C-alpha cells in the first residue's frame, strides 16, 4: 500500500511539473525546453515566392510595364520553389533552421517552427541549401547579412535548380500558434520583349543586346535583397562585380521571321543591374536588315532590380534621325556627333550658341522624309541639374518648326544632359535619345 502511495505521489509531482512548464505528453520535449532564455511558442510559417519586387509603377513613353511572376500565362518552369529553408534568429543567435523539399515546385508552403515571444528575424531562402551557404546553428546574423552569392541570371533557360531566392523579415511574435507570413524574392530579373514589325516589309530578328548587365560571376550580388525607405527592392550588387553588354540569340543563325505587321515575343533573364553611361539601358535588335536600337528606359528605368519582371513593347520602324550642325555667327559652336543606332551623342568642347538641324531618314533606301511632325523634346536627366544658368545650358534647346532646327546656347559649365525627342511619322510617335555633353 505504501509502495502504491509513493508511485501516486511521484506521478502527481510529474503532472504538476508538466503543467507548470506548459507541456503535454504529445509535445516534443526538446521543443518545449527553449534555449534557457524564455518559453518557445509553436508558430506556423507561411512562405510565398514573391509576385513583384516593387510596389511603384511608372508610365513612360517607352511603354515599359511591370508584370506579376504569378500571372496565369506568365509563370515558367523553374520560377517557383523546389526547396526552401528558414533561419530564425532571436537575441542575436540562431534559434532554429527549418527546411523542406518538394517533389514539384510550389508557389507557397507552410512550415512549423518554435520561437519565443518578442521580435524574431527570419532569413528565408528557396532553391538554395544551408550547406551551399555554409549556414549552421553557429553562424551569426552578421555573417549571413555580409554574404555574397553567385547568380547566373543572364540566361534564356533556367537551370534545373530553379531561381535562387532570399529575404530578411522581422516579425513580432505575440501568441502561440501565430501565423507568420514570409516571402522570398528571386535573385534575378525577367525581361519580356514584345516586338511589332511596322517597317513595311518582312524581316528576321536574329538577336537582341542589352547594355550594362552584371556578369555571371562569383559573388556578383549580395545574398540578401536591399530595400529603399519605401520598402521597394533596389539593386544590391557587389561593388567588385563586372558588367558588360548581354546578347540573346533568337531563332538560331537565320533568326526568327516577323512578317510586316506581325508580332513576336521573346523572354529571357538577367542579373540585377545599374545603367552606367549613358544612365539608361539601351536595347539593340539585330535583324537581317541591320541593327535597330531602342532606348527601353527613361531615367526611372536606369536600374533593374532582382525579382523585376519587365514587359517591354518594341516597335520596329524603318526610320532614323540625323542632326546637321550649322554655324551662322562667330560665336557659334559645332559639336562632335556620335551615332549609336537611334541614340545620338553631341559633344561640345567650347561654349556658344548652337544650331542642330533635324533630319528623318528612311533606313531601307536611305532617303530623307519630309512628311513628319516634331512632337516635343524632354529633358530626362542633367548634371549639373537645374535650368538655364545652372545646367550646361545658358539657353536650353528648343525646336524651331520653321527651320526644323534645335536652337540653344551651351555654357562654359562641364556636364551633360539627356533628352528624349519625339517625332511623329505616319501617325506613329517614335522616341529618340539625344545626349549633349560639355567638356
Image (tube, rainbow, N blue to C red):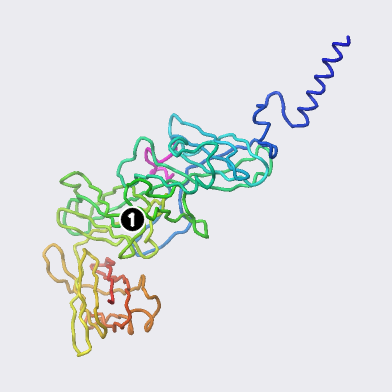
Q: Position of residue 422 (x, y in %)?
A: 29, 70
Left or right: 378, with 111 as reference point: left
Q: Which of the 4 image quadrants contains residue 404?
A: bottom left
Q: For the point 30% across and 73% down, which residue is it? A: 375
| Chief SS of the magenta region | loop
- Vertical comparison of 333 with 251: above or below: below
Q: Is residue 169 left or right of residue 23?
A: left
| Residue furthest out toward the top | 1
Q: Quadrant of residue 328?
A: bottom left
Q: Position of residue 286 (x, y in %)?
A: 20, 54
Q: Of residues 5 and 309, which is closer to you in this image? A: 5
Q: Label 1 crowding class (10 Å Cα cut-off): few <14, some 14-19, many 20+?
A: some
Residue drawn at x 42%, y 61% is: 58
| Residue nearest the observer in this picture, 185 or 152 | 152
Q: Position of residue 227 (x, y in %)?
A: 49, 55
Quadrant of the frame with the C terminus: bottom left
Which residue sits at x=19%, y=48%? 257
Give left or right: position of 317 versus 149.
Answer: left
Q: Position of residue 144 (x, y in %)?
A: 50, 45
Specify whether 116 is left or right of 387: right
Picture layout, residue 381 above or below residue 388: above
Q: Which residue is mark 1?
A: 312
In which quadrant is the N terminus drawn? Answer: top right
Q: Which residues are magenta?
A: 69-81
Amino acid at each position: 500500500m505504501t509502495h502504491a502511495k509513493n508511485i501516486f505521489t511521484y506521478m502527481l509531482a510529474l503532472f504538476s511539473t508538466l503543467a507548470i512548464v506548459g507541456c503535454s505528453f504529445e509535445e516534443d520535449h526538446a521543443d518545449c525546453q527553449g534555449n534557457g532564455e524564455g518559453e518557445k511558442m509553436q508558430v506556423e510559417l507561411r512562405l510565398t515566392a514573391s509576385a513583384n519586387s516593387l510596389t511603384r509603377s511608372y508610365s513612360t513613353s517607352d511603354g515599359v510595364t511591370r508584370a506579376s511572376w504569378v500571372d496565369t500565362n506568365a509563370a515558367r518552369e523553374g520560377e517557383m520553389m523546389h526547396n526552401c529553408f528558414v533561419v530564425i534568429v532571436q537575441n542575436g543567435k540562431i534559434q532554429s533552421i527549418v527546411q523542406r523539399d518538394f517533389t514539384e515546385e510550389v508557389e507557397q508552403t507552410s512550415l512549423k517552427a518554435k520561437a519565443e515571444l518578442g521580435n524574431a528575424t527570419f532569413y528565408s531562402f528557396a532553391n538554395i541549401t544551408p550547406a551551399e551557404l555554409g549556414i549552421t546553428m553557429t553562424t551569426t546574423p552578421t555573417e549571413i547579412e555580409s554574404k555574397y552569392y553567385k547568380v547566373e541570371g543572364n540566361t534564356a533557360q533556367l537551370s534545373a535548380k530553379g531561381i535562387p531566392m532570399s529575404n530578411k523579415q522581422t516579425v513580432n511574435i505575440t501568441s502561440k500558434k501565430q501565423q507568420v507570413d514570409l516571402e522570398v524574392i528571386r535573385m534575378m530579373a525577367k525581361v519580356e520583349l514584345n516586338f511589332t514589325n511596322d517597317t513595311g516589309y518582312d524581316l528576321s530578328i536574329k538577336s537582341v543586346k542589352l547594355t550594362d548587365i552584371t556578369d555571371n560571376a562569383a559573388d556578383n550580388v549580395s545574398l540578401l535583397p536591399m530595400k529603399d525607405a519605401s520598402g521597394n527592392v533596389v539593386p544590391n550588387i557587389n561593388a567588385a562585380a563586372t558588367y558588360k553588354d548581354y546578347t540573346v540569340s533568337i531563332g538560331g543563325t537565320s533568326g526568327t521571321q516577323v512578317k510586316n505587321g506581325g508580332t513576336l515575343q521573346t523572354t529571357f533573364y538577367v542579373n540585377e543591374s545599374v545603367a552606367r553611361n549613358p544612365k539608361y539601358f539601351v536595347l539593340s535588335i539585330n535583324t537581317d536588315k541591320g541593327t535597330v536600337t531602342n532606348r527601353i528606359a527613361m531615367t526611372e528605368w536606369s536600374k533593374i532590380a532582382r525579382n523585376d519582371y519587365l514587359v517591354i513593347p518594341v516597335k520596329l520602324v524603318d526610320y532614323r534621325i540625323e542632326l546637321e550642325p550649322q554655324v551662322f555667327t562667330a560665336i557659334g559652336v559645332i559639336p562632335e556627333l556620335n551615332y549609336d543606332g537611334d541614340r545620338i551623342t553631341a559633344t561640345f568642347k567650347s561654349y556658344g550658341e548652337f544650331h542642330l538641324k533635324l533630319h528623318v531618314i528612311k533606313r531601307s533606301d536611305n532617303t530623307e522624309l519630309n512628311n513628319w511632325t516634331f512632337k516635343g523634346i524632354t529633358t530626362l536627366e542633367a548634371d549639373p541639374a537645374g535650368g538655364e544658368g545652372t545646367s550646361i545650358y545658358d539657353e536650353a534647346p528648343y525646336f524651331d518648326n520653321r527651320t526644323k532646327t534645335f536652337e540653344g546656347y551651351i555654357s562654359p559649365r562641364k556636364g551633360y544632359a539627356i533628352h528624349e525627342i519625339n517625332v511623329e511619322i505616319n501617325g506613329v510617335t517614335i522616341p529618340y535619345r539625344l545626349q549633349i555633353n560639355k567638356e
